[in-house]
Amino acid sequence: MKKILIVEDDLSIQALLYDFIKEAGYDAVTAGDGVEALAKYAAQDFDLVLLDIMLPKIDGYGVLEVIRQKSNVPVIMLTALEEEMYQIKGLDLQADDYITKPFSLPVLIRKIAAVLRRSSPSDTVPQTISYKDLTLDLDGYKAYVKGEAIDLTPREFEILREFLSHAGRILTRQNLLHSLWKYEFFGDERVIDTHIKNLRKKLGCADYIETIRGVGYRIDKENKK
């Protein structure tokens, strides 16, 4: 089992990340500041570090610098700082990826999986899901219709991935909210309808999403469209 070090000083976010990462099938260890993070990193072997930038005692950049003196372990930076200069600084210090708060937890899990795959020499086969003219690149978070890229938001990509992963199965709005929003969602479940409406426009001729009136949606594996 892959082990991830979660470095986050906000205890509510730390607990959320810990629960979600454990649920995704990884082992997890938490740290609340830069000093604790480096102590735990020195004491154990980790496959990936999820590292907040704004930390007490030693910030995320300082933690990353120390880690890079000793190891090439994959590091994903977390931050509320959106300015390009902060992202560039993290990447210059050899961070493997960068995600800005607030972020989608399912997207974060996919990023973790992609970074772990890239760091494992034996895991070099591209991860894709295909259905008729539609292909999803799970590593690159890209979608293609007849080989042509289409521009999807991360949430649209996740909804489409959920449909393709369960072709032939009816997914209710509650199914989708539980799978994709988890603890993040507070609001009207009809938000799903809006995402699917936008998704259908972008898919065009490859719109294989079927509405099951009063129940939900599905991509029907027997559909001859």
Image: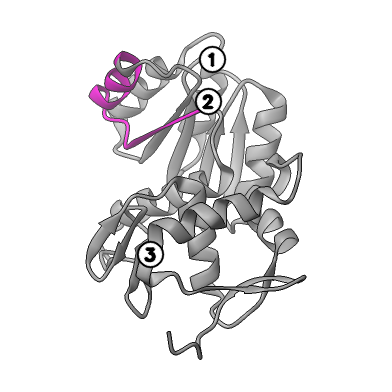
Q: Position of residue 110 (x, y in %)?
A: 46, 52
Q: For the residues labelled 2 and 1, say whether their Cβ atoms are less than 8 Å apart.
A: yes
Residue 128 visible in the picture:
no
Secondary element at tag 3: helix
Image coordinates for residue 130, horizontal then vertical, percent: 37, 75
* Kind of residue sitting beneath label 2: Ala
Question: Going from the N terminus, do you reach mark 3 or mark 2 first?
Answer: 2
Residue at screen point 39% across, 15% down = 62
Foreground pick, 120 / 126: 126
Q: Work out whether 82 lies above or below 176.
A: above
Mark 3 closeness class: few <14, some 14–19, many ≥20 residues within 10 Å: few
Secondary structure under badge 1?
A: loop
Residue 165: image location, x then y, percent: 51, 72
User: Three-letter amino acid code at disc 1?
Assistant: Leu
What residue sits right under mark 3 in the picture?
A: 204
* Colour setting: one colour
**Magenta-colored stretch includes residue 87:** yes
| Residues at discs 1 and 3 in contact (Cβ within 8 Å) | no
Q: Nearer the viewer, residue 142 or 139?
A: 142
Magenta stretch: includes residue 158: no
Which residue is identified by label 2?
Answer: 37
N-terminal label among 2 and 1 = 2
Q: Position of residue 64 (x, y in %)?
A: 37, 24
Image: magenta residue range: 85-101
Residue on which disc 1 sits: 55
